[in-house]
Amino acid sequence: MTGIQTHIPTEVHFEFLGMTIPIHWDYHAILMVTVWFVLVPICIIVIRFGKPKPTLTGIHPKVSIRNGVWWWFSVHKYGLIFSISLALAGAIVAVTVSGGFSGSLHSMFGLTTVALGCLQIMGGWLRGTHGGKNYYSADPNDPKTWFGDHYNMTPRRRKFEAYHKTAGYFVYFFAAGAVASGMMQYPMPGLATFIVAMVLIAFVVSVVLEYKGYRYDGYRAAHGYTMDAPFNKEREFL
């Protein structure tokens, strides 16, 4: 492949195995592009536009991958865990075969992207409890059973949403930088064309779904649209 910079290793020697293995950087590039420009966008678009239309009392079953009504949340959660795990594995392999952190622009963008992606996953574990007047574990006649970080929009939940939703934009900033700098080191015109196509597809799909009115409020989808729900009452005039 022409244009590849000479400092990029093309093989790695494993002393304990007594063998030298060629490095196929195109596999690394394809993996990372698949993660950040195919899998992750799907997970984001699904949770943005896949939520059901809000009903009077919201969603009653437990938040679980086994309950189909939560499919949009399950795709987002487990899809991102799978995607970031692939990216982390790809980064570890790249650092290993390179003999450590190279300090290049691509490595800085790439490792920052993966680190922020991992923080997104870990942050998801801190989102708190669900709760709700009509949730499976609650008694509609006993307000003491309604409490949940999401239902009551506690400071914990607000901090989680403020970070999780905002940090996602920054992850993509670094992902774009990692891909651009990687392409400068290891040109793959076909892959670059694919990236542009995926960005355009995600853009068009998002515009169409937004126009069709599929972006429902997550709180109202989960807990219903009555004014007795705390966060609905708080946003009564919004």
Image (cartoon, rainbow, N blue to C red):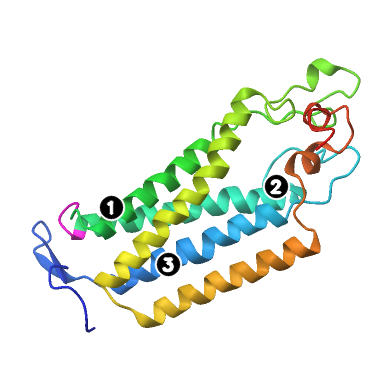
Q: Which residues are magenta?
A: 97-101
Q: Residue at x 57, y 44 (%)?
A: 165
x and y percent of residue 153 in the render?
A: 69, 27
Q: Residues within 10 Å of mark 3 (few under 14, many from 20)?
A: many
Secondary structure type for disc 3: helix
Does 232 sit left or right of 22 as displayed?
Answer: right
> Marks 1 and 2, Cα distance to the nearest angstrom?
39 Å
Residue denoted by label 1: 108
Q: Earlier in the sequence, mark 1 or mark 2?
A: 2
Q: Which mark is residue 171?
A: none
The main secondary structure of the magenta stretch is loop
Q: Where's the C terminus, which quadrant?
A: top right
Secondary structure type for disc 1: helix
Q: What amino acid is found at the position of numbered circle 2 in the picture?
A: Arg
Q: What amino acid is found at the position of numbered circle 3 in the picture?
A: Val
Disc 2 versus disc 3: nearer the observer: 3
Q: Residue at x 44, y 40 (%)?
A: 119
Q: Mark 1 and mark 3 in contact? Answer it, CB < 8 Å.
A: no
Q: Which mark is residue 66?
A: 2
x and y percent of residue 222 in the render?
A: 78, 40
Q: Residue at x 59, y 61 (%)?
A: 42
Q: Mark 2 and mark 3 in contact? Answer it, CB < 8 Å.
A: no
x and y percent of residue 56 in the render?
A: 91, 40
Q: Earlier in the sequence, mark 2 or mark 3?
A: 3
Does 53 sit left or right of 51 as displayed?
Answer: right
> Marks 1 and 3, Cα distance to the nearest angstrom?
17 Å
Residue denoted by label 3: 33
Disc 1 versus disc 3: nearer the observer: 1
